[in-house]
Amino acid sequence: MSIKIITDSACDLPDEIISENDIAMVPFHVLLEGVDYLDRETMQPEELYRKMRQGVMPKTAQITPLQFVEVFTRYAKEGKQCLYIAFSSKMSGTCNIARLAAQHVKSEHPDYVIEIIDSECGALAQGLAVWEAAKMAQAGKPLQEIVAAITLQCRHTEHIFSVDDLEYLFRGGRVDRISSFVGTLLNVKPILNVKEGCMIPIEKVRGKAKAMNRIVELMAERGSNLQEQIIAINHADDLQSALKLKAMIEERFSSSNFVINTVGCVLGSHIGIGGVAAFFLNKDYYRLNEADCSS
């Protein structure tokens, strides 16, 4: 029985990877100037950032139960097993909506098999897990083996990123108004990571160059086998910074496998324009993977 990999538009995978690996992607909603758009279907990130530069403040909304029911029912009727890899439940209620939708579909299609992973990730950290799951499915790996491998990967994928505009973090409740105002005046760039599915500021530096240097330093502290991994880089409408970060990682770690893409509408609406991020597997991933292989 074939396995269908499903994700949502928070994964930020490039369109060609989605298409080449036959991944189903369910779109979040983007609310802009009173209009409800579908992320990466009727609203592209480039258009979103153009509107944001004009001063428009977007909002996002969860994927609806009906969207999931329609997708899951389609594959249930086709007799496919499914794995849905969801955006972090600490940042969105979408994973829980998917679980309820899956229960409904299974009540009408009792033989339907679906697993749902709360990735506790977002952006290309989630995307790397989705991509790996698709490759495992294409290689004929059984569903439970894929679930175990992807869960391990998700729990040990580091998210290290910096944002340019503190106003968006203020609106999201992650910094207070004074910190936002003073930080903007002083060109402060917060460094953030994701821990147990939550976006957490960890330190602050002055200026974008220092922020990117610190991202690379944190990669050295937390990462392992970086020259062998696929390193993912996201940028919020700042390709120049993404390419500069790529060059810095290449020089420091001799990494050669990269995937680079724009931060999508979901996270872009909350972190603002100009952010840059790196995603990679940490030391614990390799330690635990080696332990599993030797047991």
Image (cartoon, grey):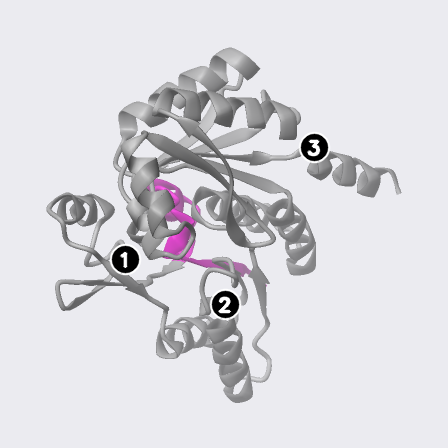
Work out how far the residue at label 1 is from the one at label 2, CA to CA, in angstroms: 17 Å
Residue 73, image x, y percentages: 43, 77
Would you name the residue on which mark 3 appears? 283
**Quarter of the C terminus within the rendering:** top right
In this view, the residue in front, 194 or 247, is: 194
Q: Is 226 contained in the magenta span?
A: no
Vertical order, 181 against 40 (above or below): above
Q: Earlier in the sequence, mark 3 or mark 2?
A: 2
Q: Please give the name of the residue rendered at 70% of the width and 32% of the height, measured from the top-left corner.
A: 283
Q: Tell me which residue sits at (38%, 58%) in the image.
A: 25
Inspect this view and state whether residue 267 appears: no
For this orientation, the residue located farthest to the bottom is: 108
Residue at far right of view: 295
Who's the residue at 46% across and 60% down the image?
91
- Under mark 3, the amino acid is Lys
The stretch of residues the image draws in magenta is 1-24
Question: Distance between the Cα atoms at labels 1 and 3?
Answer: 34 Å
- Label 2 sits on residue: 95
Secondary-structure class at tag 1:
loop
Under mark 1, the amino acid is Asp
State which mark lies toward you, 1 or 3.
3
